[in-house]
Image (spheres, rainbow, N blue to C red):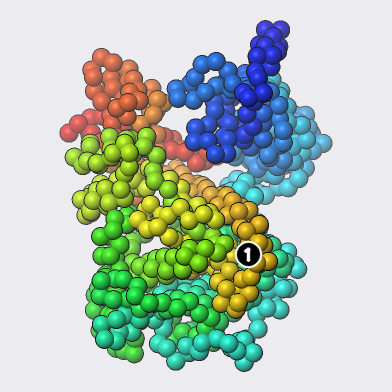
Amino acid sequence: MKEFKERKQDILNYTEEETICGTFIGNAKGFGFVEVEGEKEDYYVPEGKVNGAFHQDTVQVVLLPGKRGKRREVRVVKILNRGISRVIGTFEPSRNYGFVVPDNSKLGKDIFIPKEYTKHAVDGHKVVVDITDYGDDKRNPEGKIVEILGHRDDPGVDILSIVRNYDLPEEFPEKVTKQAERASKPVSDADRTGRIDLRDTLMITIDGEDAKDLDDAVSVSVKEGIYHLGVHIADVANYVQENSALDREALKRGTSVYLVDRVIPMLPHTLSNGICSLNQGEDRLALSCLMDINAQGEVVDYRIVETVIRVDHRMTYTAVAAMLEAKDQELIDAYHDIYPMLLEMEKLAAILRKKRKERGSIDFGMRECKIHLDETGRPIEILPYERNVATKLIEDFMLIANETVASHFYWLELPFVYRSHEAPDPDKIKKLATFIRNFGYYLKASKEELHPKEFQKLLTKIEGSKEETLISRLTLRSMQQAHYTTECLGHFGLACSTYCHFTSPIRRYPDLQIHRIIKDFLRGRLLEDKVIHYQSILPGVCKQTSDLERRADEAERETDKCKKAQYMGERIGEVFDGVISGVTAFGIYVELPNTVEGLVHISKIPGDYYIYDENAYEIYGERTGKTYKLGQQVRVKVKDVDFISHTIDFDLKEAESEE
């Protein structure tokens, strides 16, 4: 009765202006948050005020008096739309029914499964559940099992569960694969018509050893002090026509997804690994950005043209680095025809890098991890991914091509898709500045404006230090998330006013969309009706592809977390040195040199009762005053691993950390 009166009073008290619509984000502890598009701060929904809302539901809420920290509190008064109808989880049987524990902890409650809808699942089966009743604040949701993925211990089931949980498309529809097969025909004389023939231009691809979708080739020559750089990108738009079955499927996927043990491609392999892949010695159609660059790194002239090309050599990062850094004579002899060009490429890349650095571009130099699996999917090694002269060279050439193309269409004032990266949030910069002070570094952060050069200076100072990887990663976390926009908002991280994604149409839909606009412009088809058409569709394309990119990123991170948890699960009781990478009210996060991160719960820190100081980003002992803060080195022992939530618990090895 008391709860009913509270709810009635809430509804009576709110005015039309106080009604807010947004997306409900659940929490395992029963409370939640509501995200509202266009607002930086989300709203807090206390336990008991959720009113049956489920994670990802679109809800209507009313403001309540009071705050939780900086957040306004709200109560859900209406569920406008259900956001999730299918759940992935682990089946737990009972005598006359069963439960499914969701993989997604934000769902909060187990799903009740009547006996007739268990599909004969057994304890430990990973299953797909359709929700039949969402329940309420006092009653669990109900559902029926529609698919059994396998036992949680079976090889591959862990990653398959993540694939299904993020609703990543797996197989291509038959209509799409057949269309891809029909499009995959050798380049003909008709295809070459109207294109600039660059088949006699010396050019190469440089990729990883296991790459199969080669969508960019590069060429460099020097004449009278001017570098002539060609960035040649597979003309995917020639094979994927707008609004075709192929195109609709590509937009639905938005991006290729690179999981720890598999790739879920945006386009069928018959295209991405076939006619659209710039394979050595084969004629291919391309869009080329041909740039003339002076010794100061300035693009003094350029052309964006349709071309036909033929790659001379398919090179790897390892081989190119061996020639340029180690001066491997055997490789130099084997590739004597391109070695002089590689030397010029190295010089040009250094010039371009210096130019970017002078304007304040931030090079994080992140060492992402590479997780090696055995044939059963068991993680056997976690190593940092090393950048070398070859990976940097390709980055430099792709960046300048993306800038040049974006600038060209910005000044034409035509509809376009930009890659935008706005200035970081001041609160995150304050937290970062506090963190790096623990290492003796400082960040000059003005309240009015922060120039990317300040980050660049910081990253230069930490280069080569043992804390470089950690600070680089946390600096990156302090940044805003880049996204796709129709308005040119600039790119903070690159310190440039115009930027786009032009160089990967095989694996990113925005690049494919840009290629269509470029081809329409080059062929004189970008008339009023086409301009209106692009103006109408591009906002939706930008929103959808930005969302799908985030989904892919989250799925990739989750598969990494899954394998890291399995890796550490075999190391229970082992001791590691690490650095405190996060401080919260419930404990401290510690990151190991191999990028694995785990939690030391605040109640498990020995010797005192510890209190969280939000302003100082540290915890301190009530009696001893001992502090644990960001950046502090500690020694930890692996205590436990949760294979469902993919989380790792550490214990502090207090005696060793004080030695």
Total marks shown come to 1
Residue at the outermost front position:
528
Q: Residue at x 26, y 86 (%)?
A: 224
Quarter assignment of residue 352: bottom left
Q: How far across and how far down the image is residue 230, in percent? A: 41, 79
Viewer-proximal residue among 199 and 118: 199
Within the image, what quadrant is residue 294 found in? bottom left
Single out the residue that lies furthest toward the right: 116
Choose between 567 and 407: the one closer to the eye: 407
Q: Residues within 10 Å of mark 1 (few under 14, many from 20)?
A: some
**Residue 566 location in percent, x, y?**
47, 46
Mark 1 residue element: helix
Question: Is residue 333 depicted above or below 586 in this figure?
Answer: below
Closest to the observer: 313 or 236? 236
The location of residue 392, given as percent across then percent down, is 33, 67
Q: From this viewpoint, is residue 97 visible?
A: yes
Question: Considering only vertical position in the picture, is 296 above or below 58?
Answer: below
- Residue at 23% over, 37% down: 437
- Name the side, left or right, on which 119 lies relative to 593: right
Q: Amino acid at mark 1?
A: Val
Can you see residue 256?
no
Q: Quadrant of the N terminus?
A: top right
Which quadrant: the C terminus? Answer: top left
Instruction: Please determine whether, in this image, residue 299 is positioned above or below residue 659.
Output: below
Q: Which quadrant of the view contains residue 191? A: bottom right
User: Quick check: 365 above or below 18?
Assistant: below
**Residue 493 on image: x %, y %:** 37, 53
Q: Which residue is denoted by mark 1 in the rendering?
A: 531
**Residue visible at 67% across and 71% down in the picture:** 241
Q: Is residue 481 left or right of residue 137?
A: left
Residue occupying image coordinates x 37% and y 48%: 476
